[in-house]
Each structure stands twice: as C-alpha cells, then as structure tokens.
Image (tube, rainbow, N blue to C red):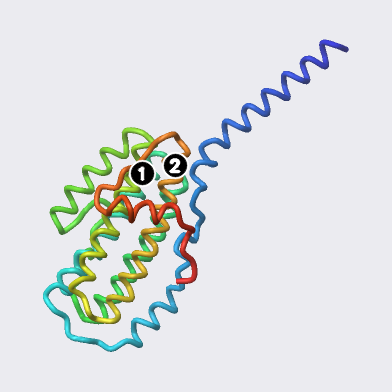
Amino acid sequence: MKNSAKNIGKLFLLAVSLFLFSCTKEDVSDQVNNNTDNLNYAGLEAQIKGLPKESLNTAELASLSFMREEEKLAKDVYVTLYNKWGVNIFTNISASELTHMNTVLLLLNKYSLTDPVGSNPVGVFRDTSLQKLYNQLVAKGNTSILEAYKVGATIEDLDLFDLKNQLINIDNQDIRLVYEMLMKGSRNHLRSFYKNILKVGGSYTPQYISQAEFDAIVESAMATGF
C-alpha cells in the first residue's frame, strides 16, 4: 500500500513536470494577443477616402514606396522567425504588419502609384538596403530565441525612427493619419518584444530612437482604440 502511494506520487510529479515544460514556451510567447493594434481597418479606410487627395511632394512619393516595403520587411522577418521558433508573438505581430502593409497600399492606390511589393514573395525586396537588412536580421534571429526577440525590438525601433523622420516632410492629411497609426502599432509591438526579452533574461538598448523615448514607450501601457 505504501509503495502504491509512492508510485502514485511519482506519477503525479512527472505529470506536473511535463505540463510545466510544455507551457514554458507558450507562456513566453503570449506576451502579445492576436489583436495587438486594435485597428479598425474598415474605419481607417473610410477616413483615408474621406480626406482630400492632395498633391504629393518628392519626399512623400519616396516615403510611401519605402514604407510599404519596410512594413513588408517587418512582416517577412516575423513570418520567417515564427517558422524557425514556433513562438506565437511572431505570427501574431506578422498579422499586424500585414494590416500595416495593406494600409499603406490604400494610399498608393488612392494616388495611383506603383506598388513596389507587387507579387514579391517573403524575403524579396526591390529596395536593396531593405533586402540586405532582411538577410542580416534573419541570420541574427536564427541564432537563439533571445536574439529573435531582439530582432523584433530592433525592427520596431527602426520603424519608429523612420516614421518620425519622414513625418517631418509630409503635410498630406491622409499620409500623416496612416503614419501616426503605424507608429502607435510599432510602439505596441516594441512593448511586447521587450517584455519577451526580459522574460528570457535578456536586455535591449535602442539603436535608433533615443533611450528616453524607448523608456517612455516600454514603461507605458498598450495603446488602444485606433
């Protein structure tokens, strides 16, 4: 009887250990939910169509093409890292990035501009600088799950930096609306990746935005209602 009780106890401990082991990976990945951006796409599309179609300056023309591919860069890296690590944060945020891509495409279509993405598959870019960056980020993210999370933080860090700088030369109301929405999304993504970095014992120092801006983002709550 005593031996039977011991055996039952051992089986119980084994079952608990297996359960905890199976949950560890998922617990880390679930720092971001499926609706990271809380984006009302149909509502945003209506807003874009409702704003005037203004003339585009040279900076705005170049910016729209570049941001369409930079949002693709984010999506493609996250798709690739999900295939490598199978962690939900990458597939969840890649879905948000696809929405961001489609939102920029709304602007390209509104102004009858050529889409630089076209039918290019994952990992293929027209912009050579983005092609090189994609290759570098994927190589780094494939080395460990911590580095993969850092790659995510780096992408959002860069995205915020680029959007902020491009807004300086943009006055069209519809483009400003979209870019400000993209920045809100990137701040949410950065918060999520940073939580995962800390969860696995790592750290991240911003490479593009200032430390003060980074601290303000990660120490504040997720943005909602956009």
Percent of width and height locating residue 132: 17, 48
Q: Does 180 appear above or below 156?
A: below
Taking the spot 26% from the left edge, 64% from the top edge, the residue there is: 163
Taking the spot 50% from the left edge, 41% from the top edge, the residue there is: 28
Determine the secondary structure under disc 2.
Answer: loop
- Of marks 1 and 2, which one's residue comes earlier in the chain? 1
Taking the spot 49% from the left edge, 58% from the top edge, the residue there is: 221
Return the residue at label 1.
Answer: 81
In this view of the protein, which residue sits in the foreground, 122 or 21?
21
Residue density around tag 1, few if under 14, some if 14–19, many if 20 or more, within 10 Å: many
In this picture, residue 8 sits left or right of residue 66: right
- The amino acid pointed to by label 1 is Leu
Report whether residue 5 is seen.
Answer: yes
Residue density around tag 2, few if under 14, some if 14–19, many if 20 or more, within 10 Å: some
Q: In the rendered image, which quarter contains the N terminus?
A: top right
Residue 86 circle label: 2
Taking the spot 45% from the left edge, 71% from the top edge, the residue there is: 226
Determine the secondary structure under disc 1.
Answer: helix
In this view of the protein, which residue sits in the foreground, 36 or 184?
184
Percent of width and height locating residue 180: 33, 70
